[in-house]
Image (cartoon, rainbow, N blue to C red):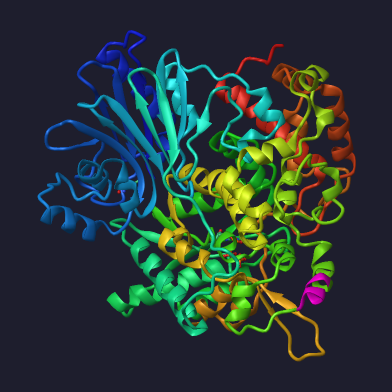
Amino acid sequence: MCGLISAFYSDSVDPPSAHHLRNKLNASLELVKHRGPDSYGIYVSPDARVGLGHARLSIIDVLTGKQPLSDEDELVHCVVTGEIYDNDRLRAELHSQGYSFKTHSDSELVVQLYKRDRFNLLLNLRGEFAFVLYDLKRRFLFAARDRFGIKPLYYTTFKGCIMFASEMKAFMGLGWQAEWDIDSIVHSGDFGGERTVFKGVQKLPPGYLAICRATGQIETRSYWDISFPAPTVVPGATMDDMISTVRDLLVESVRLRLRSDVPLAVYLSGGIDSSAVAGIATQLLREQDPAAKLTTFTLAYVDDPTTDESPLAARAAAHIGADIHMVSATEAALVDVLEQSIWHSEQPNVTFHAAGKMLLSKAVHEAGYKVVLSGEGSDEIFGGYPFFALDYLRDADPAGEALGILLPSEAERLAISAKYGVGAGPLFASVGEKAAPKFNAPRPLLRTTSHVAIMSLLAKNTDTFLSEVLEHTGGSDVVRCAEEGIEPIVRHNSVMGKWHSLNVSLYVITKTLLGRMILSTAGDRADMANSLESRPPFLDHHLVEYVQNLPPSLKIMPVRENESSEWTLVEKWILREAAKPFITEEVYHRKKVHFNPPPSGSPAVPNTLLPLQKHLKARITQEKVEHLGFIGWSGIKDQLEEYLESPTFPPHGGLDPRARILMIVLSYIVLQERFHVPPLRF
Ligand SMILES: Nc1ncnc2c1ncn2[C@@H]1O[C@H](COP(=O)(O)OP(=O)(O)OP(=O)(O)O)[C@@H](O)[C@H]1O
Ligand SMILES: NC(=O)CC[C@H](N)C(=O)O
């Protein structure tokens, strides 16, 4: 993907000279050049009130697809990041209607579709994208972000200038000065909602557009959202038809995402999602060339054989005749890229997730690839996380029953819930009965387990903040924060039982964990740090809209051998059936394992520090912590000393809880240094 930046000086301020604005945009592009090292391009409007900048990672139409793009009358100017699929069909349609193109770039569709459909152009865009378009005649900026937030887009206003950018660091080139947003930090507004750690900087939410006018006004609105049917709506198709439709839609999604003018590889974990993508990609490539061989990359957790899936990935690659490259994720290697990962994430890192992805993207980039396919989004669409089981069991599934699926009775659901309720999975080990009472929600928020899980992830350790911060903000209010990110209609649908609880849960996790972490810190940002575009075929909206309408029991299927045996739940059931022709028997039956690169299992030599301990000890000093202006040294010092003396090694690649807190503190230190943030003053 590329990087974009835009500046729009409202009528209330004097604009800079055209020359000055170009220099500023160039300085911004320098800060995001990792996103587009192939070429830079700038547009400045005749009155120098508007500037657009683009750093390009050339993927489609490498030679002539340079940006910014414009129409033949030079009245519409645009910068686009990401990929818009179905380019050939849409182009042919526009051609036949008299629209003409200057390049073969997929991005140019935005310009011509805008001319034809105005804001409705978004309904025609399939893929992952963010763009900013300037309509010179009407004098407004029109920005938008893809439906799932695969591509980032931040915005802020500084001294009368409205700015959009792929990464916040680009704002610094335009003269923006970062300041801490303590309210957002305390309430985790960067994860619960669309705020960031910096005052006044917001993310444009997934599926939203923004219109900015010369008065300085910014209007944002949703153009697409996830939605589910009432639990009683029965699909008018047989089970076999539904399985083959899911298969066809997934194959179509992979087919579109194989379109690239530069080399493409696949991230292969050995789980069902990436194995299905790799299997389908191989089949499609061989339709063109029977000798085609896919290249795959796997992160191997060499320090921890208990969570390492690389042998499974090797077997999956052998099954489809793909090449596989193993990339070692040792604790030392993860720690080496940790600070870079924080700088690219622009928000706190609490695990090695993003750092692990950076090791992977670096290896793929160094091997000469510019595009990868990945399996992200499948768990959120098909119901893959272990804690979804509780939400599936919470409600009956009349639509599933009407299809003739044998389902547990209410009493049996309660009994299975008890089994699944405790230790619902490694990701949220604390979730379930133990964690729930911590949150005294003043009113019913949502009837889902995932919501509690998210709240437990959001909760900040109140002891680490200075007392002034607590007086100023009232302390961490995770309920408020979690509410911030949920559209009121979703709460209504949940509380009124209009959506099955599993579907509410899928919604919440798609918006929070997927949108604000997996696709951002550990997705786009970790990949683009190494100039690599990743494409997640599971997040094709045609596929997603179809799966949304399937009864919950096709996502999580209860099965038992006979009437006297126990029920077990098969997660992502319909995906397993749809992907069966492309995966090994082993992967078909396999349970989910989280992507969570682990630290070392234990100190190699007694009385020596592990790489993470050593790094945190060197970087988290009294001076650095006090310079932040919102964290107290005494609490942090105790956590650090305890972690250095007696680190623990939770199972499933988890981090010592004190190390997680220290990683957050390290994140603020790194962000303060790199963004030149002044200490917080009250
Ligand atoms: N160890 C790894 N090596 C390479 N890529 C990985 C690794 N772990 C995860 N990924 C990439 O991130 C994506 C999301 O990971 P996730 O664990 O959710 O999916 P999965 O492993 O493919 O399937 P499952 O959810 O069934 O385990 C994967 O599909 C894959 O593209
Ligand atoms: N890297 C990108 O964002 C790609 C933009 C556009 N699709 C191109 O190929 O140039």
Segment colored magenta: 409-414
Does 259 sit above or below residue 649?
Answer: below
Q: Exactly how many numbered labels are in the figure? A: 0
Location of residue 393 (image quadrant): bottom right
Location of residue 163 (image quadrant): top left
Q: Position of residue 607 (x, y in %)?
A: 88, 43
Does 61 sit above or below residue 196?
Answer: below
Judge whether residue 36 is colored magenta. Answer: no
User: Looking at the rendering, in which quadrant would you find the C terminus?
Assistant: top right
Judge whether residue 412 is colored magenta. Answer: yes
Residue 243 or residue 315, whichever sits in front? 243
The residue located at (31%, 17%) in the rendering is 21
Q: Position of residue 244 (x, y in %)?
A: 45, 80
Does 310 sit above or below residue 341?
Answer: below
664 to the left or right of 238: right
The residue located at (58%, 53%) in the rendering is 510
The residue located at (81%, 46%) in the rendering is 656
Residue 9 or residue 120, whichever sits in front? 120
461 to the left or right of 42: right
Displayed-image quarter of ligand 1: bottom right
Residue 125 or residue 638, whichever sits in front? 125
Q: Position of residue 12 (x, y in %)?
A: 36, 10
Residue 264 or residue 147, whichever sits in front? 147
User: Looking at the rendering, in which quadrant would you find the N terminus?
Assistant: top left
Q: Position of residue 454 (x, y in %)?
A: 70, 47
